Image (cartoon, coloured by chain):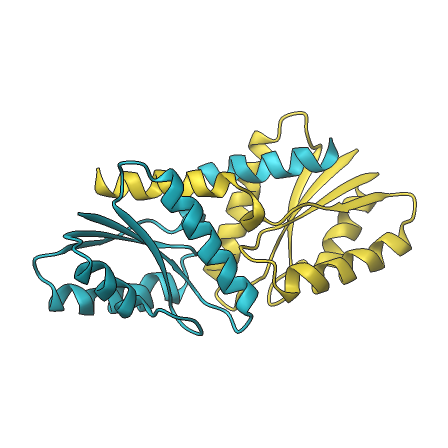
Chain colours: A yellow, B cyan
């Protein structure tokens, strides 16, 4: 069973966390056969935490987990904090394959999305 | 003359700001006829500032400026800080049309980009 966990920073502003939850529902609807379960987790300031999110996925039966950092730059959070938290859960569940995907900002297609937004603004 | 300014938060980490500058070069290469000039600006912690970025575009001849927030959520920065800074420059240059585009995280296509990243991770 494959699980996708979108990991966001988390905000003191509840509406920002809700935006992530809404996006997660959209991902779940579009995931098709790619993932059996899609959820979100937060590095800080919102629930569930990354370890709790992974734990929930494993308890729900996931034997393959993809953690996708919803971040724009490869700062300390992406380079160190998320890998450390994921690594801890990997050691707890050695038989579950937990992988960290590239962060959003690293994806070249973001350029096209930005240009689409920009062009629709001048139209 | 049309100018696109990608506005990022800015980071104490120089490499994160450089990621934005690299992305901006990619946007410039792909912009085609849509924009005559593409640049970036930062809300804080990096240069140029948003007012300076707009001023540079206007001095370079822009009579139409699109400010695109490179942000994932509609927090205070997107809802208040950027509009306030842009509004100030709009008052200084009433004959230049300055518009704020939707922020990246509001774009539904982000869902597809995330799914592509997730799928390529399990492949």
Measuring from the top left, give residue B3's x and y in whole percent: 25, 51
Measuring from the top left, give residue A97's x and y in whole percent: 84, 42
In the image, is A86 to the left or to the right of B8?
right
Measuring from the top left, give residue B18's x and y in whole percent: 50, 61
Q: Is residue A69 above or below residue A95?
A: below
Q: Is residue A88 visible?
A: yes
Quadrant in the picture for residue B78: bottom left
Q: Which residue is located at x 72 percent, y 53 percent?
A: A53
In the image, is B106 to the left or to the right of B51?
right
Q: Which residue is located at x 65 percent, y 66 percent?
A: A76
Q: Is residue B24 above or below residue A117?
A: below
**Between A53 and B45, which is closer to the camera in this rendering?**
B45
**Between A118 and A43, which is closer to the camera in this rendering?**
A118
Quadrant in the picture for residue A8: bottom right
Q: Is residue B107 visible?
A: no
In the image, is B55 to the left or to the right of A65?
left
**Between A21 and A123, which is closer to the camera in this rendering?**
A123
């Amino acid at each position: 069973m494959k699980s996708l966990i979108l990991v966001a920073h988390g905000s003191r502003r509840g509406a920002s966390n809700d935006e992530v939850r809404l996006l997660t529902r959209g991902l779940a609807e579009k995931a098709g056969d790619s993932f059996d379960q899609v959820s979100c987790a937060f590095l800080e300031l919102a629930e569930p935490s990354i370890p709790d999110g992974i734990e929930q996925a494993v308890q729900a039966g996931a034997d393959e987990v993809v953690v996708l950092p919803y971040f724009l730059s490869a700062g300390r959070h992406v380079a160190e904090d998320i890998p450390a938290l994921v690594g801890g859960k990997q050691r707890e569940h050695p038989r579950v394959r937990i992988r960290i995907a590239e962060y959003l900002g690293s994806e070249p297609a973001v350029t096209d999305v930005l240009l689409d937004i920009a062009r629709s603004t001048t139209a």
